[in-house]
Image (spheres, coloured by chain):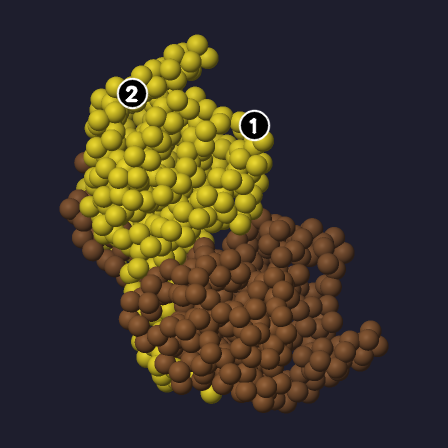
Chain colours: A yellow, B brown
Amino acid sequence: MDIQAYMTQVGTQARQASRALLRATTEQKNRALLAMANALEANKATLQAENAKDLVKGEANGLDAAMLDRLAITDVTIASMAEGLRQIAALQDPVGEISDMSFRPSGIQVGKMRVPLGVVGIIYESRPNVTIDAAALCLKSGNAAILRGGSEALHSNQALAGCIRQGLSDAGLAADTVQVIETTDREVVGHLIAMPEFVDVIIPRGGKGLIERISQGARVPVIKHLDGICHVYIDDDADFEKAVKVALNAKTHRYGVCNAMETLLVAESQAEKVLPELAKLYAEKQVELRGCEKTCAIIDAKAASEEDWASEYLAPVLSIKVVADVDAAMDHIASFSSGHTESIITENFTTARRFLAEVDSSSVMVNASTRFADGFEYGLGAEIGISTDKFHARGPVGLEGLTSQKYIVLGDGTIRQ
Amino acid sequence: MDIQAYMTQVGTQARQASRALLRATTEQKNRALLAMANALEANKATLQAENAKDLVKGEANGLDAAMLDRLAITDVTIASMAEGLRQIAALQDPVGEISDMSFRPSGIQVGKMRVPLGVVGIIYESRPNVTIDAAALCLKSGNAAILRGGSEALHSNQALAGCIRQGLSDAGLAADTVQVIETTDREVVGHLIAMPEFVDVIIPRGGKGLIERISQGARVPVIKHLDGICHVYIDDDADFEKAVKVALNAKTHRYGVCNAMETLLVAESQAEKVLPELAKLYAEKQVELRGCEKTCAIIDAKAASEEDWASEYLAPVLSIKVVADVDAAMDHIASFSSGHTESIITENFTTARRFLAEVDSSSVMVNASTRFADGFEYGLGAEIGISTDKFHARGPVGLEGLTSQKYIVLGDGTIRQ
């Protein structure tokens, strides 16, 4: 297979489909999404038979239980993919939204219209449900999609692609609106990320290694999600109960997630009161504590190394540092945060206001658990990822993050003098 | 000079300054801008003496009259730079703007806060006034700036940098908030565009060659402005007078600008009526016409080649094509437009609505001259460039384009269940 020729064809088709999509109505897009949901349910047997091929091959190739689990298309997976499609159909269409129209002294009326980005390339690993999820978000936001899933899920993804095509065709939309790459050749990725004439943005979903590799090589913008080294800072003026509740929830609600707290910062004036209580609660959950010198003088914790402050544990491990005040806390955050999510616990209005303005992360919180940094919790209705970049989309990316705004100008034969 | 070490120092200082800037008040930023304006006026003699060194050297190096003209800091240049600073001081501060705050079922209140991008690198050619303009826009939008001007303006830019530093210092802001590169070593650019740890976005201002080179090599986002191949389409349902007025203005108001019309598209049903009138008016302005076969059958014009449709003339030259209808016009635009600005002349509501939705350019207009695609005409109050990209900022980029939005979350000890 000539991968270059194949990708040029895929790109050309995607660009054409993205133009056609500008003429699609909201009703048509929703109809396609609902038809895809029905197709998933109607083709359950085929989907699971194709999925079985991937599972057998995966087992033979020595995939571990967790990976096989992610790869499996169970009845529950199908129901949840179908439910996701129906939810996205129910969301408001962001495309065409007009805002800020105003008259200018020249006589023109100028404002902005929300428009699709064009063609979105998505590169992801084993979970086949991403195929459906990504297709649905791109379609609803008016973007053509090129999906490149993991080689271990090839049969599953091709079967899902069939359901997607059926949905598109039921609604009278071009089959190329969503293209699922048909080869596992790794050369595909290199082409996909370097075709600015065909692809407007790349979204990698997967481990840090994948994302860094793609960012390095990309010739188009990448919406990337790197580490989540999130902090909670318990301020001098923190309410004791809120502090304990939030610090416990942010660490222990779930461990393997990017919005879990990895480092707890505690104002010196609070440390002797709040740390013993927290240490007790963390012990009940078997959370390993690694503290600075001052922390270790108050509670039982291992000595933290410099490396700890820069670690995303994604595990029941927490580093704790006692700091002088909010300035010291913000300095620590500026040095070690990955720019994902930070929260302050304080009753002080001015301190809260400073923290919100001065902390440079995609989500900044007051008296709330970092675990809320999530598209669904924020009411976006869907999430294609969480951006730790500052450019374009920042934080949880929903439909709006897959769009841009162009200017529109209305006149009456108006000319520039 | 060790350029790598120098750029690392510049970058480190810029990053620090950008953090400090998050604490600056609007009043402080405005005070600095006004103090810069005063400093320019007070240091007129020095500025012009330093500028004279560049002019002498430029002449010796064989710069042509137009380039020397752009390089010169006249009394008018100084007055207009000072006026620009005062205008930017008068603009509303975009930083800290909070929007869309709403309560979620979980009890959190979530919304967005507008924040600076961080550190902006600007690479530009001969005009020294860009130094002041770029410094002012970055400062007002809360960004630290690294400015790399043309080597032919080195003395002028360093003298201007002195006025900028004086303004910053008068307002109690760090001198490193705006750094003007002190060497003409070309290696600087290579470092500046590849330091994601220090620079958040690069804005090249200059010719297409410069912008393409920078986009190719950049490891950070680039707000880029490539060609302006703008179209006006005179629709079947166009008003004759509006069509003539706009088609004349869009081509002849100014020739060397990116928002000038380069190709006129005319619906077949209108061609015999509108083209002769336009040909007469263009002839009065000595505009050279290059037409498709049908055009040449109606008016006196050279035969246009394929290359003409893809040309940004920036000169009194216009290509003209007769098309079947709005679909053919939009097909031509999709094939040849650079995505800058297109306008339709029509009285038909539905055709206008389709053109606005389906044309994928940064500005799309109805019954208005393409010459309006401009930050000042749109009421942005200032413009750092016009983006032909779809990602992040699109069209004229003012203060808002130099910012991003982060999420803010307020709670009351709220935790995720």
- Residue appearing at x 24%, y 23% in the figure: A44
Q: Is residue A88 left or right of residue A231?
A: left
The amino acid type of the residue labelled 1 equals Met
Q: Secondary structure at mark 2?
A: helix
Q: Is residue A91 left or right of residue B133?
A: left
Report the Cα–Cα distance between label 2 and label 1.
27 Å
Tell me where residue B247 appears, x and y as whole percent.
48, 79
Task: Name the disc covering residue A46, or none.
Answer: 2
Mark 2 neighbour density, 10 Å: few (under 14) some (14–19) many (20 or more) = some
Tell me where residue B280 appears, x and y as whole percent.
54, 87
Q: Which residue in the rendered view is the most extreme toward the right?
A: B60
- Residue appearing at x 36%, y 54% in the figure: A22
Q: Nearer the viewer, residue B13 or A192?
A: A192
Residue B28 seen by the camera: no
Q: Which circle's residue, 2 or 1, is located before the other in the chain? A: 1
Residue at which label 1 appears: A1
Q: Chain of mark 1?
A: A
Tell me where residue B307 appears, x and y as whole percent.
63, 62
Task: In the rendered view, tell whether residue A341 sits above or below residue A77.
Answer: below
Residue B229 seen by the camera: yes
The amino acid type of the residue labelled 2 equals Thr
Q: Which residue in the rendered view is the most extreme toward the top?
A: A60
> In which quadrant is the C terminus of chain B drawn?
top left
Task: In the rendered view, tell whether residue A266 sits above or below residue B17.
Answer: above
Q: Which residue in the rendered view is the most extreme toward the front?
A: B297
